[in-house]
Amino acid sequence: MRYRRADVAGGTYFFTVNLAERKRTLLVDHVDRLREAIRLVKKAHPFHIDAMVILPDHLHALWTLPERDADFAMRWALIKAGFSRQLPGGERRNKSRLSKGERGIWQRRYWEHLIRDDTDRARHVDYIHYNPVKHGYVQRVTDWPYSSFLRYVKRGLYSENWAGNVMNDKCNEFGEYESR
């Protein structure tokens, strides 16, 4: 089945990518393996990570693709496969995954959103960086080690004690729990 996706070469996209079993902590337990999978894909198929946060069972990322390139789906497929190959087997797999020879690490689909303008971008970057606080992993954004937040602090874009004010009645407008 082919899904309709935004197809803008050189575009900037927000993503939410989830583990299949949302109670697992594989992404932080094996964060170096995830980083290596991302590094290898970036080397072969360049893109820029504008912002990112890795949580135990999901991640959020903001990417800008190269000019004349809109293929984020291939990049995510390679990252997911590269990470999964590094982990021991044994996860729960349904009949469909077994018949296709797929691992059961990741949800097949993910959420993506094409960034429309500077305001949209800023809101998504704030959302990414605030997410560990939202989920109760830390009290302060600066305390979460798996985030691009400190990179933003070093560049003078955030203060180290930035608390973010992205939480409101519209927090799900980013599609955090929707998947594609």
Image (spheres, rainbow, N blue to C red):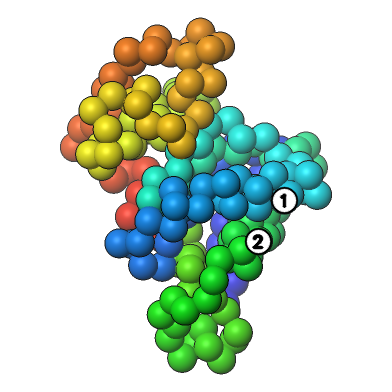
Where is residue 40 drawn, in percent x and y?
73, 49
Instruction: Identify the residue under disc 2.
Output: 82
Q: Amino acid at mark 2?
A: Gly
Q: Nearer the viewer, residue 8 or 28?
A: 28
Question: CB atoms at circles 1 and 2 under 8 Å apart?
Answer: yes
Q: Amino acid at mark 1?
A: Val
Q: Secondary structure at mark 1?
A: helix
Q: Decide if residue 73 is in sight here.
A: no
Where is residue 99 drawn, in percent x and y?
56, 91
Where is residue 116 drawn, in percent x and y?
52, 33
In the image, farthest residue toward the left:
169
Is 46 placed above or below 79 here?
Answer: above
Q: Secondary structure at mark 2?
A: helix
The answer to whether residue 67 is left or right of residue 114 is right
Instruction: Identify the residue under disc 1.
Output: 41
The answer to whether residue 161 is left or right of residue 80 is left
